[in-house]
Amino acid sequence: MDDLKQYALTLATQARQASRRLGGIDGGQRNTWLARTAELLVENGSVLTEANERDLVVASENGLSGAAIDRLRLTSDRLAAMVTALQEIAALPDPVGEVIESNVRPNGLLVTRVRVPLGVVFFIFESRPNVTIDAAALCVKSGNAVILRGGKEAIHSNRALYEILVEAARECGLPSGAVQLVDTVDRAAVGEFLALGSLIDVTIPRGGKSLIERVAADATMPIIKHFDGICHVFVDRAADLEMARRIVVDSKCQRPGVCNAAETLLVDREVAETFLPEIAGSLEAEGVLLKGCPETCRLVPSAEEAREVDFRTEYLDLVISVRVVDDVAAAIDHIDEFGSGHTEAIVTADLETSRRFCRDVDSSAVMVNASTRFNDGGEFGLGAEIGISTDKFHARGPCGLRELTCYKYVVHGAGQLKSG
């Protein structure tokens, strides 16, 4: 495109105009749009598969990793999951207009705090085309207009999904501009949108560290972000070791290319000699490469020696860092130094140890005797998520409908005067 600045301004202006109408549209109409979108996904399954195959061919030719190609692939199961997510989001309560709290002041004023949309969301994401549907659904259901900017590797899939979103919006009477797609892979376009803080209320980047850092540096509006998903599983001395084995394998291997997959395994020294050879066999059977501390390498001769940088790495692949620690305190210290505030898990039968871990670990989600893979909007009952925030303000962890709203005060009086 010759004039990216004007292109970005046009889309943002249209989104701003749409957002003014969306918040006032009846929640039932927004739910009708979600239902129609789900129907169109089913009706256009072959079209979506064909578009996705075009992306997959290019991905293979460009040498994308196996994990990256997996994130990009639209299988029949994932298409079905997209339909289910739309249905679940439609079934959730409408957050717009919810009275969060109210009180009557001594002078008779009724002060209420009411949930309202954020306005215009600029959403930047990579690889996973199903996110196109999740993000649009969550934004519109919560009364926001959204500008979607997917990665170039999924451009054909995203265009096909966007056509479905727009067709459903047109049929259901949603305002033009409620959902828009940045239809260029030129990275310079992102900078033009990030400069439009007067029209865009929030930017949400969902992707690699370099993308997040760029958005954080250039955005002229607030951002909701997560950096690395350096997630840990700590196997305590009081753990059921068979349970621990299953949890570690699931956390690492069930889908290694996603942000809530485990990247580091911490093992209490008291059980290391028993547990490490066993878990190494299970992980290696799944094709996982272990990078370990000296104690790990002694117990697992096939493990590579880990460097400090390995404990700071989000692999998003079949690789895991392993360290033997003295106790739960040492595990917490390791997580404090190397973690990214995303997801941490402990496997233990000791209630006091689990309480200490939950209290002292500073992450968006702490799992006790469960896989890290459960830190997810759908699994938490949010219907879907627009991302997992590691920030510390109103949105932390999986961001669903309520995290895409803020509030305003509405005050009702009966003629009260400050001067009186």
Image: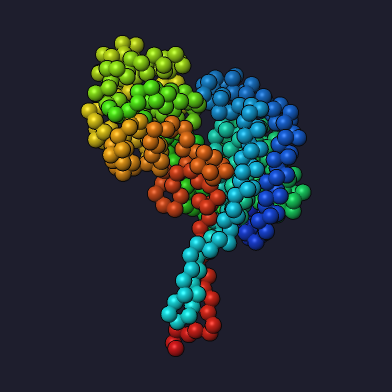
Residue at 45% x, 82% y: name it.
107
| Residue 160, image x, y percentages | 70, 35
Residue at 40% x, 37% y: name it.
367
Residue at 66% x, 38% y: name it.
83
Residue at 26% x, 33% y: name it.
328
Q: How many marks?
A: 0
| Residue 186 vertical position relative to residue 54 in the rendered view, above or below | below
Image-based side of 292 in relation to 40, left or right? left
| Residue 308, image x, y percentages | 29, 26
**Is there any visible trace of residue 146 in the rendered image?**
no
Q: Quarter of the image containing the C terminus?
A: bottom left
Q: Residue furthest bottom?
A: 420
| Residue 215 vertical position relative to residue 308 in the rendered view, above or below | below
| Residue 243, image x, y percentages | 39, 25
Residue 80 figure quarter: top right
Image-based side of 346 in relation to 81, left or right? left
**Is there any visible trace of residue 384 in the rendered image?**
yes
Image-based side of 311 in relation to 219, left or right? left
| Residue 225, image x, y percentages | 46, 44
Q: Residue furthest left?
A: 326
Residue 305 figure quarter: top left
| Residue 297 vertical position relative to residue 74 in the rendered view, above or below | above
Which of the two residues, 74 or 52, is positioned nearer the viewer here? 74
Which of the two residues, 280 or 135, is positioned nearer the viewer here? 280
Q: Residue furthest top?
A: 301
What's the image's color scheme?
rainbow
Q: Quarter of the image containing the N terminus?
A: top right
| Residue 417 vertical position relative to residue 191 in the rendered view, above or below | below
Which of the two residues, 173 or 27, is positioned nearer the viewer here? 27
